[in-house]
Structure formats: structure tokens, C-alpha cells
């Protein structure tokens, strides 16, 4: 049985990014996949459809071919500072890259009241960026991996991002490389001879974030992020326990609502299959 605490941790957590590598599916296939996922018993884990703004018109056409209206599919729209809001889409959030406060302000003004998530350079430690996000009610975004081993951020960098976001009370999204629940070394593609890398687990990221939101010490947050034994995470109806530290289901719900919002994945099947293999998903 899937426990209440795991459902709280992963409810609407997976933003489907099938258009992007390594899946890199075409738009009609990706739209059909999303519509199929919406009808599954596991649809409680499904978040938004990740869509580049320049494909908005083609997306509407592909939806119509499935008999769906744009209101049926929530979108997280990837934009540049030059993009203008398209008409007719059900946009839940907007994601953009920006490295200057003035650009963040421009994006917030253009897209308000839609929630904006700004992909930050993880090496940029300027407080002004976090202060701007906090002031404007915007969120942060972190890219934890990629198609090559050197694209994967180390534990210290991801922990630093999570702790800064928690300190500033800035919500965040994550993307790239979060295919599996628990941190481990995996091949980066299904190709023979694919390079391998230590990939961050989405359970690790969300639990580290939830613990950080509720005041866990930084060194312990890093240990949660680096945990490689799923048995050390004990989920039940009341909450989750990691070694001697715990969060209630209500605390998890608060952290998800106010802090760790979702993560982008090019697969909705792989995370669920892994959770079932671990005995966490019924």
C-alpha cells in the first residue's frame, strides 16, 4: 500500500518533460503520453506538461487531435525574456533562465500572476538574486544533471542551493537527471556504452528539501541528499523517518506546498517502475 506520507511527498511532483533528452520524443507522441498518464491510477503523481513557448501553437493542435481542450492539460511553459504570453493555454507556471535582477523583474511583470521559476547558475552566490526572487514572489530552479557525467552537480552544490532557498523562503523546482528515487550510479542513456554517473534521487531531493524547510541542520540535510539505502527512509501513514529524525505527513504537505514544488522528468514510467521495484508504490 502506498502510504499517506509518500503520497504527500510525491503528489503532482513529476512535471512531464518527454520533449527533452534523453527521451526527446516528438510533440504529438508526448501529448498522447500525457493524456494517457492522466487516466492512470498513478495520476496523483503527475504534474504539468513542460512545453517550450515556441511550440505553443503546435501543442494546441496536437491536443485537439486527441480530443482534448487546452484547459485539460496544465502547462509549465519554458520561456525567454523575449517571449510573450500565448493565448488559450492552461499555464500553471513559467520557467526561464536569468542572471540579473532586472531580467527577473521584467519576466515577473510580463507573466504575472503566473508563478515564475528562474533557473539560477549554481555557481552564482550573489545574495541579490535570492533577494529579488523573495521580493517578487518568484521561485528558483536547479538543473541537477544532464546528458554527460560532468553535467551532474555534486552534493555540496545541490545542498547549498536547497539551504539558500530554504533560508530565503523561496520555492523551487528541479530538473534533469532525477530519473530514479534513490541516489546511485546509473547509465545516462539506454545506449550500449553509455557513460555512467552518480545521479541524485528524487526522493533524496524532496526529503532533503522538506527537512531543510523544517530546520534540519545543514550537515544532516547533506546526508539525506546523499543517502543510498532506501531502507533508511521509513514511510508510514503518520510521516517519514530517516534514522532518528522524522517529519509528519502534515509537515511534508507544508514543504511541498510552500517549497519543493516539482521536478521535470522526460519519463513518467521510469520513476513509478522504480518505486514499485522498491516496494514503495502499490
Image (tube, rainbow, N blue to C red):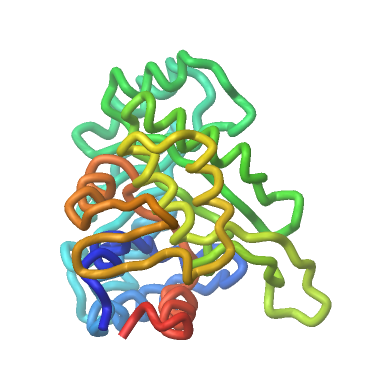
Point out residue 47 in the picture as x, y percentages from the top left corner: 30, 62
Whether residue 60 is visible to the viewer of this picture, yes or no, is: no
Q: Position of residue 129 (x, y in %)?
A: 46, 20
Position of residue 10 relative to residue 215, above or below, is below
Q: Is residue 89 left or right of residue 82?
A: left
- Residue at the far front: name it: 244
Q: Is residue 176 above or below residue 232?
A: above
The residue shown at (61%, 68%) is 22
Camera-side residue: 180 or 74? Answer: 180
Q: Answer with left or right where residue 139 lies relative to residue 191.
A: left
Residue 134 visible in the picture: yes
User: Is 105 in front, or is 208?
Assistant: 208
Residue for point 27% across, 62% down: 12
Q: Position of residue 133 (x, y in %)?
A: 36, 24
Location of the N terminus by quadrant is bottom left
User: Could you say which is closer to the camera, residue 132 or residue 27?
Assistant: 132
Amino acid at each position: 500500500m502506498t502510504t499517506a506520507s509518500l503520497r504527500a511527498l510525491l503528489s503532482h511532483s513529476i512535471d512531464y518533460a518527454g520533449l527533452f533528452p534523453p527521451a526527446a520524443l516528438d510533440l504529438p507522441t508526448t501529448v498522447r503520453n500525457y493524456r494517457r498518464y492522466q487516466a492512470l491510477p498513478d495520476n496523483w503523481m503527475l504534474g504539468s506538461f513542460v512545453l517550450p513557448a515556441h511550440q505553443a501553437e503546435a501543442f494546441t493542435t496536437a491536443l485537439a487531435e486527441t480530443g482534448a481542450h487546452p484547459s485539460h492539460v496544465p502547462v509549465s511553459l519554458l520561456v525567454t525574456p523575449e517571449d510573450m504570453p500565448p493565448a488559450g493555454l492552461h499555464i500553471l507556471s513559467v520557467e526561464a533562465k536569468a542572471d540579473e535582477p532586472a531580467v527577473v523583474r521584467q519576466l515577473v511583470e510580463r507573466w504575472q500572476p503566473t508563478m515564475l521559476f528562474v533557473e539560477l547558475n549554481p555557481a552564482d552566490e550573489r545574495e541579490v538574486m535570492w533577494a529579488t526572487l523573495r521580493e517578487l514572489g518568484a521561485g528558483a530552479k536547479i538543473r541537477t544533471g544532464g546528458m554527460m557525467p560532468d553535467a551532474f552537480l555534486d552534493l555540496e552544490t545541490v545542498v547549498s542551493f536547497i539551504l539558500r532557498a530554504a533560508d530565503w523562503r523561496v520555492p523551487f523546482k528541479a530538473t534533469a537527471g532525477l530519473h530514479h528515487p534513490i541516489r546511485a550510479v546509473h547509465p545516462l542513456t539506454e545506449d550500449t556504452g553509455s557513460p555512467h554517473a552518480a545521479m541524485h534521487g528524487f526522493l533524496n531531493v524532496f526529503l532533503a528539501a522538506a527537512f531543510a524547510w523544517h530546520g534540519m541542520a545543514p550537515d544532516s540535510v547533506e546526508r539525506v541528499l546523499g543517502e543510498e539505502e532506501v531502507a533508511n527512509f521509513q514511510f508510514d501513514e503518520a510521516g517519514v523517518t530517516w534514522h532518528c529524525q522524522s517529519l509528519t505527513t502534515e509537515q511534508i504537505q507544508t514543504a511541498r506546498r510552500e517549497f519543493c514544488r516539482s521536478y521535470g522528468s522526460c519519463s513518467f514510467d521510469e520513476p513509478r517502475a522504480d518505486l514499485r521495484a522498491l516496494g514503495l508504490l502499490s
